[in-house]
Amino acid sequence: MSIRMESGTVDTNRDIEVFSNVKQLPGEHRTTTGDTISQGYLDRQAASESNARSYPRKLPFALAQAKGIYIKDVDGNVYYDCLSGAGAIALGHNHTVVQDAIRTELDNNLPMLTLDITTPIKEEFVKEILSCFPEEFAKNAKVQFCGPSGADAVEAAIKLVKIATGRRSMAAFHGGYHGMTHGALSMMGNLGSKNLIPGLMSDVHFLPFPYNYRSPMGDVGVDPDVACSNYIDTVLTDDESGVTKPAGIIVEAVQGEGGKIPAPDAWMVRLRKITKEQGIPLIIDEIQSGLGRTGKMFAFEHSGIIPDVVVLSKAIGGAQPLAVVVYNKELDVWGPGAHAGTFRGNQLGMAAGIATIKFIKENKLADNAAKMGELFKTLLSGIQADTKCIGDIRGRGLMLGVEIVNPLSGILQSGKPERFEKLARRIQFECFSRGLIIEIGGRQSSVLRFLPPLIITEEQVKHICSIFKEAVIAAEDTMMVSPN
């Protein structure tokens, strides 16, 4: 089976051939109407599920099957999945090595849930996860298994550093995202999720993140990353800053939900230097960026720093629920039961995680992520030159963002054309109608985000970008108008 492209045909790696009842392949324009099987599912979901559901509002379909980078809805339409479970599905859907690991667990009647009692699978998982880190970090590291979500790992990390330092405050960054539980939400940059919730965790101080396309420090005559680190240094050393020394500082080396903004390597080095000098544990949130997504096993490795704490989830469980905190043993002063969770002993997640980690390492998928990420950037830059609304293309590896702007409005934000949320949402819809799933994020929901699985091929990247170009042009034709 093949897919038509401008340059010819592309082998689909036979993943689509596992599907039955395929009506349209990715890239074939489909008409979205209310008279579909999916719509019936959506209507019933709206009647029975919480109003807090989000993805079905932007991606109005019901899923039937998934394989590799492809998913199929109940109407028989096939899509490229560049959401990948918000980055959790590192090897694509239903990868053979993950399926085999789960089957082995089931066939051998191994325990599925063990609380924090150890097992041979758990011991192997710890060995594999530590093998992914730089030796300087791994040799002094301990692992805390948490509840099944990344947010729970963040909550555990907060407890860890507060107990270890005896301090009460935390520091986080503008644009940061660390989960939706109470403490994690308190350290989130986005106000839309926080404004309606009274009594969030107190003593959280927010610092500027070097968002170089729109500098948070304004025009101060130096590079934004230098200005940001100078400000942080001042806040932490000035005895009149009003900010008590934090128990920890949490940061994403590539901001995910905040708009796929990579931290400059030099800034990360300065941040590490500042935190070391001040005796402040540095927590790196690798929940979305970990296990090869940015072109290295962990995003912090691009800068060469060694953190004190790393929080992990998503890909480490091979798409099964699993979360851990990996930290310097000097912080291991909390007592038994200081953090727990029934599902921290998820053996299926550990088995699937072992298989995923081994496959990523053995097949050098971090290198593939770096290579495919550069191809994405090159092709997206070409689309930027041929269209009007792409303000910035950024990211690392297969963690990419495209910021949508309206240069015709005459309005500037931080010296750049204004963000254009409505157009970004229209582009997302045009992508969806052509068989491409991407997500939106960033400030004013103006950033289109690409998180394809690490197994993506060059041919698939090219086809995805050709679909994206069609979607951008169609959306611009519909919505891009001058105020004059």
Image (cartoon, grey):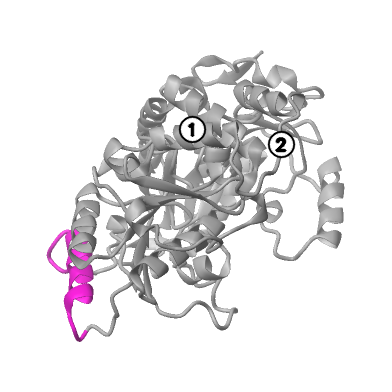
Q: What predominant SS class does the magenta segment belong to?
A: helix
Tell me which segment is drawn in magenta. 219-240
Q: Can you tell which mark lies on residue 434?
A: none
Q: Secondary structure at mark 1?
A: helix
Q: Nearer the viewer, residue 273 or 89?
A: 273
Residue at 27% in and 47% down: 306
Q: Give the structural element (helix, strand or loop) at label 2.
A: loop
Residue 229 covered by magenta stretch:
yes
Estimate how packed mark 2 is, as few (under 14), some (14 to 19) or many (20 or more) residues with alpha carbons within 10 Å: some
On screen, residue 312 versus residue 84, left or right, reads left
Mark 1 and mark 2: Cα distance apart in space? 44 Å
Residue denoted by label 2: 111
Q: Position of residue 244 (x, y in %)?
A: 29, 80
Q: Which residue is disc 1 drawn over?
A: 465
Q: Residue at x 41, y 30 (%)?
A: 369
Q: In this orientation, which residue lies closer to the viewer: 182 or 128?
A: 128
Query: Residue sitting at 17 percent across and 80 percent down?
Result: 238
Indicate the amino acid at tag 2: Pro
